[in-house]
Image (cartoon, rainbow, N blue to C red):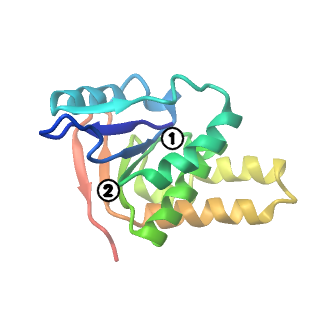
Amino acid sequence: MFLILMASSSSNSRASFKVFVSFKEENVGNNFVTHLYAALVHAGIYYFDVQRREKDEGNLMITVPKMIEESDLAIIIFSEDNAYSRLCLEEVVKIMECKKQRDLKVFLVFYRVELGRVSGLKGSYRSGIEYFQKKLDKDVRKLMRWKDALQEAGSLSGWYLDDELSVVNIKDST
């Protein structure tokens, strides 16, 4: 779900910036994110991993928006089943809101999922939304917020990681 990353400065003070990383742990927790953590540590960036301490989704739904609001940068790691996670969908909505409201910098990683699936709500992104549509048929507004945020985020530039973890930069089509 997320981390807070803090870079150490030359003085004794910490926390020169904060980064929120949105991901579905079951899909990338022991793969790409592990490599990301190692690279951040190697670069001297310290992170605070709240997600491992709070497994209760209700608590996360309260703390996550505040963490996103306090972040200087957000990284969304889209993988195959993100649209089946209510928390991942809410994170994308909040990140995109903060991008509009206060120009939060947003970086995207498409981990073993094509950009067109996210922006076009195809494949697992379509079936994930349909899954929630059945559960939340009276909450059309929430579903529309999720769809809009996925489409908006999926229209940004990002990086695609394939099965060999080679990186391909995806240019913004706008």
Q: Which mark is residue 80?
A: 1
Horizontal relation, residue 12 to residue 24: left or right: left
Residue in view at x 82 percent, y 60 percent: 139
The residue located at (73%, 60%) in the rendering is: 142
**Is 162 in front, or is 3?**
3
For marks 1 and 2 on the same chain, the one whose residue lies earlier in the sequence? 1
Rendering quarter of residue 6:
top left
**Mark 2 lies on residue:** 158
Whole-angstrom CA distance, mark 1 to mark 2, is 16 Å
Quadrant of the image occupied by residue 171: bottom left
Query: Which kind of residue does numbered mark 2 sit on?
Result: Gly
- Residue at point 47%, 39% (across, down): 23
Drawn side of residue 26 relative to residue 34, left or right: right
Kind of element beneath mark 1 = loop
Residue 127 shown left or right of residue 121 in the figure: right
The one nearer the camera, 158 or 49, is: 49
Q: Relative to 68, is 99 above or below?
A: below
Residue 5 quadrant: top left
Q: Residue, x 24% and y 38% (percent of image)?
A: 13
Q: Is residue 18 visible?
A: yes
> Residue 169 in the image: x percent, y percent?
23, 55
Crowding near the residue tagged with mark 1, few <14, some 14–19, many ≥20 C-alpha atoms within 10 Å: many
At label 2, counting other C-alpha atoms closer than 10 Å, the crowd grade (few under 14, some 14-19, many 20 or more) is: many
Quadrant in which the C terminus appears: bottom left
Q: Are marks 1 and 2 in contact (CB under 8 Å)?
A: no
